[in-house]
Amino acid sequence: MGINSVGHRLTILKSVYDVKKAQDVPVESDHYMPLSAFRFAKPRASPGVAANTSISSRRDRSPVLKCDIKRHQTARRADTASRREDESL
């Protein structure tokens, strides 16, 4: 194309993409598609699938959170015991 600037190339390619979309020209898989086309084209899941995904995610995080809580409680007990020893000296 003879255009040295990447920004100018992307501007031209996005303009071509916009014209194709406006005129309902099919966009092939090897044609340029701007990131904004992917951002808004996310497939929507049904509410049931979304709820199951959320529950599964929460269930997967639960053991990790429990371990973190136990670790913090143990560290706090050790810190408290250390302070008591320092105070008794």
Image: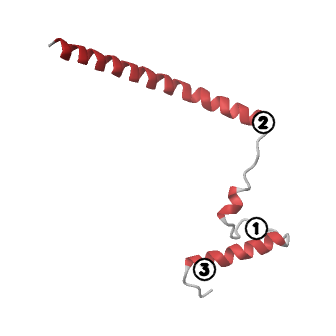
Residue ID for mark 2: 47
Left or right of 3? Residue 82 is left
Say which residue appears at 56% left-offset and 77% top-offset.
Answer: 6
Residue ID for mark 1: 28
Residue ID for mark 3: 8
Of marks 3 and 1, which one's residue comes earlier in the chain?
A: 3
**Mark-to-mark CA distance, 3 and 2:** 42 Å
- For this orientation, the residue located farthest to the front is 87
Which x, y percent locates residue 71?
39, 23
Helix, strand or loop at label 1? It is loop
User: To which quarter of the image does residue 73 belong?
Assistant: top left
Type of amino acid at the residue the image marks with label 2: Pro
Type of amino acid at the residue the image marks with label 1: Glu
Assess whether mark 2 and mark 1 are in contact (beta carbons under 8 angstroms). no
Left or right of 81? Residue 40 is right
Left or right of 45? Residue 88 is left
Q: Is residue 16 above or below residue 33?
A: below
Q: Is residue 34 above or below residue 66?
A: below
Say which residue appears at 78% left-offset and 75% top-offset.
Answer: 19
Of marks 1 and 2, which one's residue comes earlier in the chain?
A: 1
Assess whether mark 1 and mark 3 are in contact (beta carbons under 8 angstroms). no
Which x, y percent locates residue 42?
72, 51
Type of amino acid at the residue the image marks with label 3: His
Which residue is nearer to you in this view: 87 or 23?
A: 87
